[in-house]
Image (tube, rainbow, N blue to C red):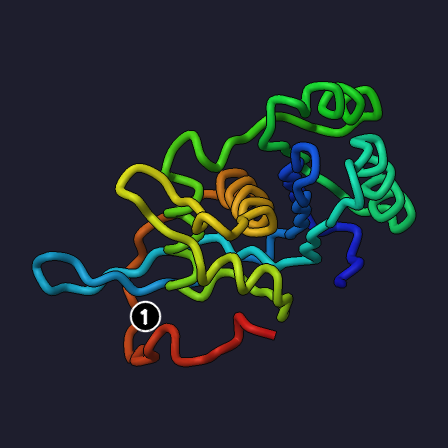
Amino acid sequence: MNLDRSLKRYIHIDLGVTGDATGIAMVHFAGFKKVKRLLPDGTEKYEELPVAEVDFVLRVLPKSEIPISRIREFIYAIVEKHGLYVRKISYDQFQSWESIQQFKQRGYNAERISVDATLEPYMSLKEAFFDQRVILYHYEPLLQELFALEFDGRKVDHPPDGSKDVADALCGAVYSCFIDNQISKVIEPSVGEHEEEGEEEWWWK
């Protein structure tokens, strides 16, 4: 993990109810990428859009029920040990109000963000994958959940026998990062520029 203390980091926690897994993800803002867009009239424009790099994703499997306080202790242990700069911590469950208050009392910017209330968070993540603006490492539980996601016309969900704990955690963290660093602007391509965006697989470690 890049331990540069100047990086802006974003954490999202998808709390599991009794017996369910909890998903945790931390990402940091990794700059901007110029992305080519084809307009309806056939002309090309470029946008500068934010890039998120994954610090870690974790699926916590409970033996019975995960004490919510242990999740906070885990975050404190990582962030405060290395002096990391966390811009926002978010949760996706109503049961999270106590944790949000505890984080605020400790000086963190914490709030509730639902990745299911609207399609925007997952559509933003989907577009970012297409644009190669998410840098991540191989984590099998995350890949299994991402590839199994379904869209029923109203929301993004998991199959009946599946889960999306870490997918939701990644989605929430990336969404917070993009919203906080969203200064998208259309720019003209440089003279003589002929690169094809997306050829390099730089986004996958």
Residue at image position (43%, 51%) is 159
Label 1, residues with CA under 10 Å away: few <14, some 14-19, many ≥20: few
Whether residue 17 is visible here, answered yes or no, is yes
**Compared to 191, does 55 lie above or below?**
above
Query: In which quarter of the view is residue 43 placed?
Result: bottom left
Residue 67, x across and y down, in percent: 82, 33
Residue 199, x across and y down, in percent: 39, 80
Residue at image position (42%, 30%) is 117
Work out whether residue 121 or residue 193 is closer to the camera in this orientation and state it. Answer: 121
Residue at image position (48%, 78%) is 201
Work out whether residue 205 or residue 8 is closer to the camera in this orientation and state it. Answer: 205
Residue at image position (55%, 42%) is 172
**Compared to 139, does 59 lie above or below?**
above
Residue 120, x across and y down, in percent: 38, 39
Q: How many marks?
A: 1
Type of residue at label 1? Ser
Query: In which quarter of the view is residue 112 placed?
Result: top right
Whether residue 88 is visible here, answered yes or no, is no
Question: In the shown orientation, is residue 161 left or right of residue 190?
Answer: right
Question: In the shown orientation, is residue 185 left or right of residue 75?
Answer: left
Question: In the shown orientation, is residue 102 left or right of residue 154?
Answer: right
Query: In which quarter of the view is residue 101 placed?
Result: top right
Helix, strand or loop under label 1 = loop
- Farthest-out residue, left: 41
Q: Which residue is mark 1?
A: 190
Residue 106, x across and y down, in percent: 84, 25
Where is the N terminus found, in terms of image quarters? Answer: bottom right
